[in-house]
Amino acid sequence: MSKISRALLLSLLALYGQLSLACERDGTCLEPRQWHIAVALGAGVRTNPLVDGDLIPLVILPDFAWYGDAFYLDNDEVGYQWLPSSSLALETFVSLNKEATFFEFGHPSNFLFGDSLAGVSMIGPQEEGERTVSIDEIAKRRWAVDAGLRFHVYAQNSEWTLALKTDISGVHEGHQAELGYRYTMMLEEWTLRLAPSLVWKSESLVDYYYGLDDRDAVAPSLRYEASSGWQPGFSIAGSKPLSEDWLFLFKAAVTKLHSGMTNSPMVESDWVHTAFVGAAYTF
């Protein structure tokens, strides 16, 4: 896979689940057994907390979904809904784990931003003797595939979700739990969504990606065993119809990384920020 095509895939995964152009995951906004296909065009970026990590560009973001009576396909997730209703929903699913998005990159200058990000770097000056490890010095971290169970509770303009996921690809054999809340409000022609979240990642998941051991070409003094932890986040997204087919939209999100990850010599930031502004066309 070329660096450009790899960057496009990483861009989609970086924003997927945060800026869906389809309506609710229970499919109430979609016609049954019909494809939903859209593409968002705009300017955005996701920061990278790793030492020597490139910013992840968000420029062209396709979105597609198909919902049947129970089976569904929603971007990188395939699932089956067991209890779809107006107040409750339960589904099992298989999806790509997105932790590896920080480790494989096409530089923004090789993507679509051109010179607009020239000279931009998340890497600040380092003190002499600082214990840091560049991602260019470590072994490859592989993609993982998760299987999970997700429970929804709907109440008026609110939605609570609880998702439990585990690695079924044998890459890190770790687990993840996600608790989320989303409040949707209408302001004239605008639809706004506020979404706090709390994510727990197991020790084996975090250590596979952010630990340093025999697989990595680093000095013994830089080896690190990562630990589990909780990561809170918050996002705000908005959209406004421009025509029958076009939609203006924006997205801003922030995630606080836990110390079991940020204490790793390869991690230099405690935060991940995401921003996107653009327009979407629905086919």
Image (cartoon, rainbow, N blue to C red):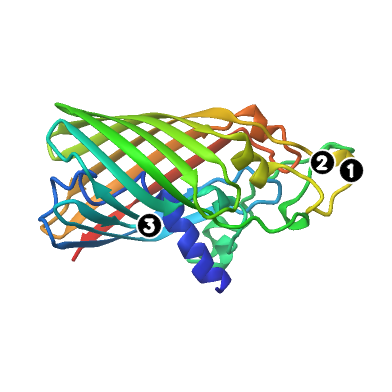
Q: Quadrant of the N terminus?
A: bottom right
Residue neighbourhood size for the residue with mark 3, other residues' Cα within 10 Å, grouped as few (<14), some (14–19), many (≥20): some
**Residue 181 in the image: above or below residue 248:** above
On the rendered structure, is 244 left or right of 90? left
The residue pinned by badge 1 equals 220
The CA span between labels 2 and 1 is 5 Å
Residue neighbourhood size for the residue with mark 1, other residues' Cα within 10 Å, grouped as few (<14), some (14–19), many (≥20): few
The residue pinned by badge 2 equals 223
**Residue 45 in the image: above or below residue 272:** below
Q: Amino acid at mark 3?
A: Asp
Q: Amino acid at mark 2?
A: Arg
x, y (%) of residue 71?
22, 55
Residue 269 in view, yes or no:
yes
The residue pinned by badge 3 equals 76
The CA span between labels 1 and 3 is 38 Å
Disc 3 or 2, which lies upstream in sequence? 3
User: Which quadrant holds residue 181?
Assistant: top left
x, y (%) of residue 203?
62, 35
The CA span between labels 3 and 2 is 34 Å
Secondary element type, mark 1: helix
Residue 44 in view, yes or no:
no
**Residue at screen point 52% across, 63% down:** 7
Task: Say if mark 2 contacts mark 1, CB within 8 Å.
Answer: yes
21 or 168: which is nearer to us?
168
Task: Say if mark 1 contacts mark 3, CB within 8 Å.
Answer: no
**Residue at screen point 76% across, 39% down:** 265
Q: Amino acid at mark 1?
A: Pro
Residue neighbourhood size for the residue with mark 2, other residues' Cα within 10 Å, grouped as few (<14), some (14–19), many (≥20): some
